[in-house]
């Protein structure tokens, strides 16, 4: 239905950039002010949904599954970029003296694996809900 390489590239990079910015903004500035579960279950899906809704209304129309592929691509790319940056920070700073060697990197990987798992569940649920809304509205508009 909608196939355009430029649209795909714009949607993919927009999702990658805004997912990374949301993730970095939370971990750098809002970590003490907002609980991580509130961020995962409310703010992050809201940011992703609003960005893609904005892209849809700006005539960056794509198939439903393509939007979600780029949302997942943006999320996993942002987590990968964040992991690399934090790993480099751990290497530059060095580990505290009371930590065993490699403990800071293990804690980073453990925390991000839990974070990724919960966020993936939230994105999958959001995917199901938006698919149900699209199907319901498609049936409703066909009746008119």
Image (cartoon, rainbow, N blue to C red):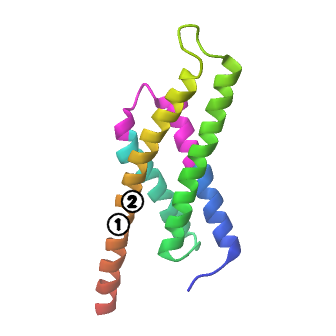
Looking at the image, residue 91 lies above or below residue 54: above
Which is nearer the eye, 33 or 90?
90
User: Quick check: can you spot residue 77?
Assistant: yes
The x and y percentages for residue 54 are 52, 63
| Label 1 SS | helix
Task: Classify 10 Å Cα crowding around label 1: few (below 14), some (14-19), many (20 and above).
Answer: few
- Say whether marks 1 and 2 touch (CB < 8 Å): yes
The x and y percentages for residue 77 are 60, 51
The x and y percentages for residue 105 are 57, 27
Quarter of the image holding residue 139? bottom left
Magenta segment includes 109:
no
Please give the count of numbered marks on the rendered protein: 2
Residue at the farthest front position = 101
Quadrant, the N terminus: bottom right
Residue at the location (32% across, 65% down)? Answer: 129
The residue indicated by pointer 2 is 124
Quarter of the image holding residue 10? bottom right
Q: Which residues are magenta?
A: 19-38
* Residue 128 tag number: 1
Looking at the image, residue 38 lies above or below residue 49: above
**In the visual, does 101 lie left or right of 122?**
right
Residue at the farthest bottom position = 143
Residue at the location (58% across, 23% down)? Answer: 102
Task: Classify 10 Å Cα crowding around label 2: few (below 14), some (14-19), many (20 and above).
Answer: some
Residue at the location (69% across, 74% down)? Answer: 5
Quadrant, the C terminus: bottom left
Magenta segment includes 26:
yes
Q: CA distance from mark 1 to mark 2?
A: 6 Å
Quarter of the image holding residue 58? bottom right
Residue at the location (47% across, 34% down)? Answer: 110
Which is nearer the eye, 122 or 117?
117
Secondary structure character of the magenta stretch overall: helix
């Amino acid at each position: 239905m909608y196939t355009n390489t430029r649209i795909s590239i714009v949607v993919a990079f927009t999702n990658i950039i805004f997912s990374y910015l949301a993730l970095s903004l939370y971990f750098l500035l809002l970590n003490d002010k907002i609980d991580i579960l509130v961020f995962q279950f409310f703010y992050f899906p809201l940011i992703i949904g609003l960005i893609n809704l904005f892209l849809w209304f700006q005539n960056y129309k794509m198939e439903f599954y393509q939007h979600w592929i780029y949302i997942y691509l943006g999320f996993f790319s942002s987590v990968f970029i964040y992991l690399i940056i934090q790993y480099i920070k751990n290497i530059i700073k060095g580990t505290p003296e009371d930590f065993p060697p490699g403990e800071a990197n293990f804690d980073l990987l453990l925390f991000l694996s839990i974070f990724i798992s919960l966020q993936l569940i939230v994105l999958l649920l959001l995917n199901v809900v938006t698919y149900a809304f699209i199907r319901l509205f498609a049936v409703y508009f066909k009746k008119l």
